[in-house]
Amino acid sequence: MLSDNINKNYFLKLLLDIGEMMLKSGAEVNRVEDSLDRMGRAYGAKGMNTFAITSSIVLTARFGDDSIVTQTRRIEGSGGNDFIKLEALNELSRECCANPVPLEELERRLEKVKEIAPPPWRLYVGSMIAAGSFAVFFGGRLADGIAAALVAALICFMQLKASEYFPGAVIFNLAASFISGLCICGICAFIPSLNSDMIMIGDIMLLIPGIAITTAVRDTLIGDTLSGSMRLMDSLVKAGAIAGGFMLAIMISRGWHI
Amino acid sequence: MIVQLITAFLGSLGFALVFNERRRLIFAAAFGGLLGWAFYLLLEELNCGTFFAVLAATAFVSVYSEVLARRLRLPSTVIFIPAAVPLVPGGSLYYTMQAAVNKNETMIKFRGSTTLQWALAIALGLSLVKAFFWAVSKAAGRSGCSKGGPKQ
């Protein structure tokens, strides 16, 4: 099937497409390496050499005629989560391993997977439910939960519409936390019976990369030290930015009220 | 306590929505969040110490998601990530930050180390279970494409 070099390169491009989408929808690094290796073998590669980190994939395949093809891909914006997409990719790679479809067919199916995206209402409703629940979970009252849910809608709006205007996720988190912190302090100044601590915790739960830290430690423990350290640094800096943003907001609002 | 269980359920459900979970799985993920927190509360009640309680609760959630994932042939992260969210130390991080705002050095150290220990406990709990399941599928000789392979 993969007789000439054009086909081999085309195949590697499709593999990298799959890898990139997997990284961007929340797959672990070793899962990406594993899936690409297996697909490569299923399509006739004799040896597969895949190296993935959160920001890059390097892929080398050795074919039966001893020709070797390498491609690399820079991955930007990995670390998101889209489980329907992740499942679809998982399914696709499993099926293609069992029954390698022609490359055109594979590309067509990839295009279909590429179109999967969560509808905005899911993000809004989910964020509001999550922030509201966690405000109550950590000891707030129902009113605190409602306030946290309202601010969560604002955070969600910023994530969807404004994040592209910031130079990176860290600065965006800093700004988003600062703005939400100011809003919460403002709301609490008008309605003093609200508990600003609990509202903030609810909204912090939306922003903090808690799971990313877990993934980081896990990557490190199973030997993907490089990805682990990258994720760890990334999440620690993000957590710092979030704490810093809320801190600034609290300080400013206190300054106004003293 | 009942309020915490309900809100843990809803919190996980919210995150499942945000992460674009398939409709059929949203309930499973949210229920995992509830079970994990219930297990944590139980261990705290038995005075096991917070570190161990968080570790064991995470391990519990992880087993729950691995078993479900194997049965339904999914990547286990799909269940684990939303279900583990109630165990994330968001409150602890906030109190660390509050201590920093109040310039209370002792509290910064105390709250900060609690947050770190908590995060470490989650990671250890997850890793132990992952390692166990990996070893089991390795021993069972499951490899090759059609069967899912050891690293699923």
Image: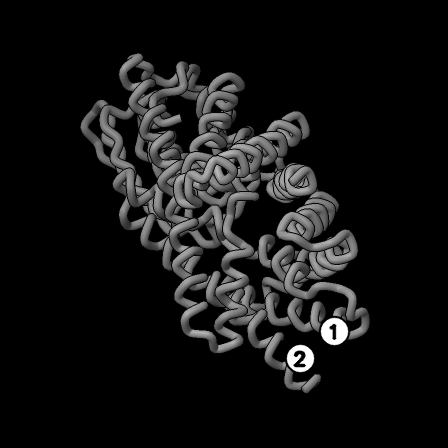
Quadrant occupied by the N terminus of chain A = top left
Residue contact at pointers 2 and 1, CB within 8 angstroms: yes
Image quadrant assignment for residue B49: top left
> Is residue B16 found left or right of A190 in the rendered image?
left
The amino acid pointed to by label 1 is Gly
User: Residue drawn at (29%, 41%), measured in percent from left and top?
Assistant: A221
Asked if labels 2 and 1 share a chain, the reply is yes
Marks 2 and 1, the one that precedes in the sequence = 1
Residue A167 percent location from the top left of the image: 51, 68
Dot 2: element: helix
Q: Position of residue B73 (x, y in %)?
A: 50, 20
Where, by quadrant of the figure, is residue A16 drawn? Answer: top left
Count how many numbered circles sit on residues in the image: 2
Mark 2, other Cα within 10 Å: few <14 / some 14–19 / many ≥20: some
Chain letter of disc 2 in the image: A
Q: Please, is residue A238 above or below residue A114 in the view?
A: below
Residue B47 visible at all: yes
Q: CA distance from mark 2 to mark 1?
A: 8 Å
Q: Which residue is mark 1?
A: A186
User: What residue is disc 2 on?
Assistant: A253
Q: Which residue sits furthest left? A: A66
Residue A212 sits above or below residue B58 on the image: below
